[in-house]
């Protein structure tokens, strides 16, 4: 969606309108959608985390106002703003706790500060939950009653939606499914969180790079060696390119990643029994538009079906997400919409 964004004109939109903010370690995406989740405007600004959270939050507020104007609206036509943020957080308090990619932002009251800067109430959620809700509302999960969405990138994020319920947990740590355990071995791989055996330690982009480095260091033959010798950086994209070119090691790395994901998905489905599981993020190896992406997905499904109950193997849908990098801001806006409509129905 990000490469061919389509916006509806103001006169065709259905009010009320909602703004969504997707906070990342490098960029902040802001957009405005109508009551049916159709985008009217979008923009992106650099995060510049080193300048501190107050500077970034002030610029977020300004970006919300710009996006509203770009949509042909006035601020009072946007009753609520949604903010999706990475890192550990205290959702009821509206605070970041200790976000790994936003160093120095610890214990920052980001929800209330953004509300101050944009003069709108703010719904505060985990960024993976926001992306999951975007897919549930208007993306690949729009026909699902419940879903689990895994976002594959540097780490593995997760969002769980059941009906209109967001699984956030008692301590704002619900849906931390990148940290489900897929190996209890004493020598299981270390996760970035400091624990062993987590899904993220095996199937994230960081893990793909590490596993590839280990294989090359062990002397496994691969066309990747020549690419690295010419100065190319080892990334999942590079691994995918060589896999598409027929390199055995690169393909094995990708298919093993799919195997690990399939194992993790079995645990999630056994716990939640959702309508479906969606895969998004930057590391889908081309997704449904690529033969490699389709093979990656088929391997995940194969592993899942081999390890789960027959009825779940038959009924649980596993597919790629469809909103791409726009899922975050659309989902954040959707959660703002959800809170707005719930508040309108609440007894006075």
Image (spheres, grey):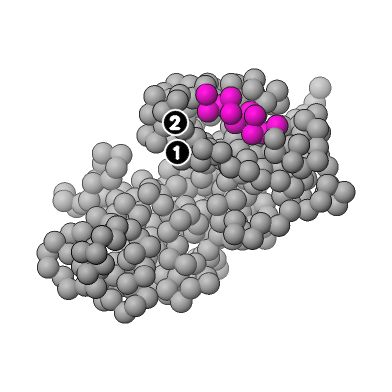
The answer to whether residue 264 is visible is yes
Image coordinates for residue 67, horizontal then vertical, percent: 70, 38
The image shows residue 161, relative to residue 68, as above or below, that is below
- The verdict on residue 163 being magenta is no
Image coordinates for residue 235, horizontal then vertical, percent: 33, 58
Q: How far apart are marks 2 and 1 (CA)?
A: 7 Å
The extreme right residue here reads 11
Q: Mark 1 points at which residue?
A: 25
The extreme left residue here reads 218
Q: Is mark 1 on a helix, strand or loop?
A: loop
Image coordinates for residue 319, horizontal then vertical, percent: 53, 65
Q: Residue at x 32, y 72 (%)?
A: 242
Image coordinates for residue 5, horizontal then vertical, percent: 66, 56
Specify the quadrant of the image occupied by residue 4. Answer: bottom right
**In the rendered view of the protein, which quadrant contains the N terminus?**
bottom right
Q: Name the residue under label 2.
A: 49
Query: Closer to the N terminus: mark 2 or mark 1?
Result: 1
Q: Residue at x 49, y 59 (%)?
A: 279
Q: Do the residues labelled 2 and 1 touch (CB within 8 Å)?
A: yes
**10 Å neighbourhood of mark 1: few (<14), some, or many (≥20)?**
some
Q: Residue at x 54, y 44 (%)?
A: 129
**In the rendered view of the protein, which quadrant contains the C terminus?**
top right
Q: What element carries label 2?
A: helix
Q: Relative to 108, is 12 on the left or the right? A: right
Specify the quadrant of the image occupied by residue 110. Answer: top right
Rendered image: mark on residue 340 = none
Residue span colored magenta? 55-65
The image shows residue 261, relative to residue 186, as above or below, that is below
The image shows residue 134, relative to residue 91, as above or below, that is below
Q: How many marks?
A: 2
| Secondary structure, magenta segment, majority class | helix
């Amino acid at each position: 969606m990000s490469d061919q964004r389509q916006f509806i004109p103001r006169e065709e939109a259905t009010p009320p309108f909602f703004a969504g903010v997707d906070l990342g370690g490098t960029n902040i995406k802001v957009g405005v959608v109508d009551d049916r989740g159709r985008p009217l405007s979008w923009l992106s600004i650099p995060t510049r985390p080193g300048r501190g959270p107050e500077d970034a939050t002030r610029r977020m507020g300004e970006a919300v106002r710009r996006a509203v104007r770009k949509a042909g609206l006035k601020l009072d036509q946007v009753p609520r703003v949604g903010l999706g943020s990475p890192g550990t957080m205290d959702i009821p308090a509206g605070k970041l706790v200790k976000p790994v990619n936003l160093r120095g932002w610890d214990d920052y009251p980001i929800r209330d500060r953004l509300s101050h800067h944009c003069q709108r109430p703010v719904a505060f959620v985990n960024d993976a939950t926001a992306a999951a809700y975007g897919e549930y509302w208007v993306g690949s999960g729009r026909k699902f009653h419940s879903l689990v969405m895994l976002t594959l990138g540097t780490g593995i994020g997760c969002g769980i939606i059941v009906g209109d319920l967001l699984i956030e947990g008692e301590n704002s740590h619900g849906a931390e499914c990148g940290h489900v355990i897929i190996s209890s071995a004493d020598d299981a791989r270390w996760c970035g969180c400091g624990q062993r055996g987590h899904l993220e330690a095996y199937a994230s982009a960081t893990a793909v790079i590490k596993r590839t480095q280990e294989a090359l260091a062990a002397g496994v033959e691969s066309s990747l060696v020549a690419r690295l010798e010419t100065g190319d950086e080892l990334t999942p994209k590079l691994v995918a390119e060589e896999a598409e070119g027929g390199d055995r090691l690169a393909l094995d790395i990708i298919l093993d990643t799919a195997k690990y994901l399939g194992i993790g998905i079995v645990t999630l489905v056994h716990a939640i029994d959702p309508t479906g599981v969606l895969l998004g993020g930057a590391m889908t190896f081309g997704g449904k538009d690529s033969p490699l992406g389709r093979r990656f997905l088929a391997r995940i499904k194969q592993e899942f079906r081999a390890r789960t109950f027959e009825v779940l193997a038959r009924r649980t849908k596993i597919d790629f997400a469809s909103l791409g990098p726009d899922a975050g801001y659309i989902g954040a806006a959707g959660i703002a919409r959800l809170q707005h409509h719930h508040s309108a129905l609440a007894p006075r």
